[in-house]
Image: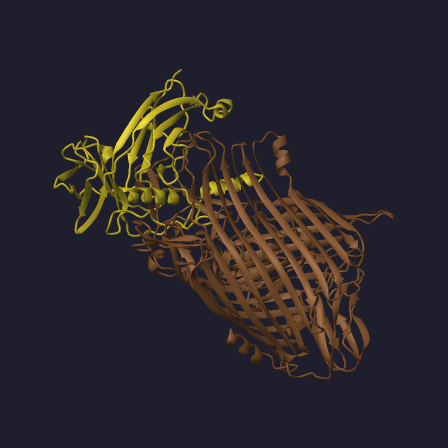
Chain colours: A yellow, B brown
Amino acid sequence: MKNIIKTFALLLLFNACDEPITIDSDSVEPVVIIEGLVTDQMTSHYVRVSRSVDFYDDVAVEPVLDAQVSIRDDQGNLYSFDHNPWNNAEQQGYYYSDIEFAGQVGTTYSLTVTIGEEVYRASDRLQPIMAIDSLTVSLDEDEFDDPEDPGYYYEVLFFAREPQDRKDFYLFKFYRNDSILRDDEDDIYFSDDDLLAEEINGIPTAGYYSLGDQARVEMYSMSRQGFIYYNDLINLLQGDGGMFGAPPVNPRTNLDNDALGFFQVSAVVSEEIAIEF
Amino acid sequence: MKRFFLLAMILIPGLTLGQSKFTLNGYVKDASNGEELIGVTVYVHELKTGTATNVYGFYALSLPQGSYEITFSSVGYQPVRKSVELTRNMEFNVELPVQITEMDEIVVTGDALDANVTDIKMSRNEINVKQVKRLPALFGEPDIIKTIQMLPGVSSAGEGTSSFFVRGGSADQNLILIDEAPVYDPSHLFGLFSVFNADVIKESELYRGGIPSRFGGRLSSILEVRTKDGNNKKLEGSGGIGSLASRIMLEGPIRKEKSSFIVSARRSYVDLFLRAAGEENTVHFYDVNAKVNWKHNNNNRFFAAIYLGRDVFDFDDTFGFDWGNATATFRWNHLFNDRLFSNTSIIASNFDYAMELDDESQGFKWTSNIREVTLKEDLNYFVSPSVELNFGYHVSYRSFEPGVIEPNSDRSLFTRTELQNEFALDHAFYLENQHKISNKLTLLYGARLSIFQSIGESDIYLYEDPQDNVNIVRTDTLSFDNFENIKTFVNLEPRFSARYMLNPASSVKFSYNRMVQNTHLISAGTVPIPFNTWAPTSYYLEPQLADQIAVGYFRNFKDNAFEFSAEAYYKDINNVTDFADNAEIFFNEDLSTEYRQGDSWSYGLELMLQKKEGRFTGFTSYTWSRTERDIPDVNLNEPFLANYDRRHNFNIVGTYELNNKWTFGANFTYTTGRPFTLPSGKYQYEDYQVDLITERNASKLPDFHRLDLSATLIPQNKRGRKWQGSWVFSIYNAYSRKNAFTIYTQTPEDSNGEPIRNQKEARLIYLFPILPSVTYNVKF
């Protein structure tokens, strides 16, 4: 919807009038935020627990340091999580599984987070993922003629075969030299397969690269619940305040007890390519 | 049906009277161009009674044999007094000369001088297009919708939009008609302008209550725009060049006094400059109106009118979208006998949009449309001077094609996907009687019977839980053939109005009406966009119902120079169509799981003072109102203020004629800011900064106020020159108030353009700072 506002602003043949404003944002009771990810990679998986803060606070969140976190799968395995096991200052509020494990396709994982008396639960099923056929590098002529960042005019194209016999939901993350790359800070790249044909013949990924860069594409499988979460999240991040689009509202989540955030279980594939001739 | 005719018998008290009476009837026209005049008072001095011409300029009076003095009068015209010797049924056509005043005054046409007080209609306003042309206009484009947004009981979502909200109704609850044909999206450029080209408008009126039975299909208002028929006496033209668009109009007789035509076109031309300047993103819109009418004889006249309009956006020749309305109206006015006037119309309307991306790997074309064909038979039966009966039958066939996405290259990642089409048949019978009980009391009572059928060809999906939009489980599919009835919805819509004269200069009025809406807009925002689709009442959508009562006090001052009205209303809507929180309303094959119908209620007080004659004309309006909604699954099932709720709304619209050369105009508007959902906190998910939302529409945008000024210059005409030019200078937002269009939030960036990941900022968008414009108009 913000795009409509942008298009609308483009219509106005003078400078789009857009300026910061201080809003009256009353303090409300903080809400528990849980972010968790279990993948099919052999690693120590994480769950982040925090509380919301006031709109104008200088911190992004208030980490919760004393939660009890565990994940159980439907095969009878129980995984315990420890808070910030490596004592990293940046990892306040992050809980890691005390052993490495790889999620299995078709298995349902259930998260339990206990903070004091309150218990928060969520579960998600690990969906299969298609393979990435290949990535290619292509020179974007428009960007070459008029680059936003000098030297950055290569784009990375994505090729794959979408399985037509099952329902899939995808989440993509793009990296340039290991830094996450988005066209806009609030972009999320995800899709269902409702409109997709089998052959995906080189769709451009986000952003532009320069010679010598290393590009990486990660593709995650998701449940429909996950697709809905990201869809709601992008609507909230990119909403227009309820003018042409709907009024902002919290995303639907698989967490109970009024917690926000999402517990995601995914299969992951990734592919890299160097930007060179 | 039996009951319907029974009702007809009860409603026609005058039918058995009037054996030795004769009928006097005819058309009243403007002497200068032959345009039929609506609402002209026809007054019989001997009987101290009279009637008024209908929307086709026709009147009929049933009088005992005798000789009468009859005066035909209308604001802006010289009254015409005629002597009539009525010894047989007579046809009596009259032409009224335009009032020649010292100055070229703006006058409202087509109304009796004291109609504000004496007419039974309430909650109704005419929009004076002549005045609109002299008011300040955004980019110099005069627009009746912008004036409508300033009427009492009407609000807007802010500037730069063509949506309007009437008495707590949403934007899709207005029936917008051009020559009787519905216009589904009245906006150009996402609402900066409306589709109504001021050059061709003859009359436009807005009903927000006391809605006559001949109208139905929307809950909150009727905006009826009628275009000019074309001058049947001489060829005339006009044109104009504004800051954004230019216009041309030509009208004249085909056979003098028998038939005439009018054609008009308007096109924006900024894209031509943009292209010349090498800009690759361009946009333009156009409108074409055309109409012909011919009078076969006094008993048979025919009209054919079309409207075509479109907006085209083109980005870099690879991505683009467009939308447009097309309407066509064919009308046959027929006099069955001296007292029975018939209007038969065949109407077609189409709205469509398309979006196309030209790209090898991800090219697609997305199209959608809504179409309807309507047959209307409307009859006016002039039973006696005190009884006028209106009745008729309307039937519409509608098709809704919500969307098809097709790949436009062999290698595109898209596969052809088509949403379920829907079809509907909409019948309405109505009967209404205007009954003058005494010189003081007039009643208008009637009803409209709406029979709506959702029909095939269509598949209806059955769901395990039809309201579960997360885990959608289809259990079965019901298939229906072409025209097979899926479900029928029958609703009776009673309508009642009363007017009681307190004294010759003041009256009280009351009205009650029930309205039914079977065409639902699929939009979760405040202002509809062209890409919103419509859906009919169907298996999963109930008809929306509105009940409204209004009372009003009406008074004219200083010999009808000033008109005052005060109205209070209460409106209650059942099954108002809304959508679940987080609803996916675009291209959703299971859209029905997102439908949430609930309640809406609104009440308010509206004051208006209007001056229609003299050097200074204009109006001021003040509205106090409150509108709430209660929708299941929305806002945690708690009631919330509607997006378009406005507590206070104050407007002044005026023009002043200084002399023959100069006219000045001004608009001022002040309204409470619209309800708004502001975040009550924030949190982080991955590295996204996310707003925490607690309650819908709990805050308000800043108050909105704006002053616009205009000056119209008509230079003295040189002798012998065949054309007359005029300049309109406008200043929009004279004191450059930064009025909030909307507020959004984002992650702020530091001076290097890098995101500041632990902060969040709110930003205000406002559309227009002070904005001067010039329009040059020419008449020839």
Residue at 76% across, 57% down:
B259
Looking at the image, residue B765 sits to the left or right of residue B556; the answer is: left
Answer above or below: position of A128 versus B435: above
Answer above or below: position of B116 versus B302: below
Locate residue B382, reporting x and y percent: 67, 75
Residue B565 found in image quarter: bottom right
Residue B411 is at least partly visible in this image? yes
Observer-nearest residue: B513 or A148?
Answer: B513
Looking at the image, residue B516 sits to the left or right of residue A255; the answer is: right
Locate residue B25, reporting x and y percent: 74, 72
Answer above or below: position of B72 versus B732: below
Locate residue B85, reporting x and y percent: 81, 78
Observer-nearest residue: B349 or B272?
Answer: B349
Residue A43 found in image quarter: top left
Observer-nearest residue: B112 or B364?
Answer: B364
Locate residue B270, reporting x and y percent: 63, 38
Residue at 16% across, 38% down:
A81
Q: Residue furthest top?
A: A277
Residue B600 is at least partly visible in this image? no
Observer-nearest residue: B427 or B691?
Answer: B427
Q: For the image shown, how many numbered marks are present on the structure?
A: 0
Residue at 33% across, 32% down:
A173
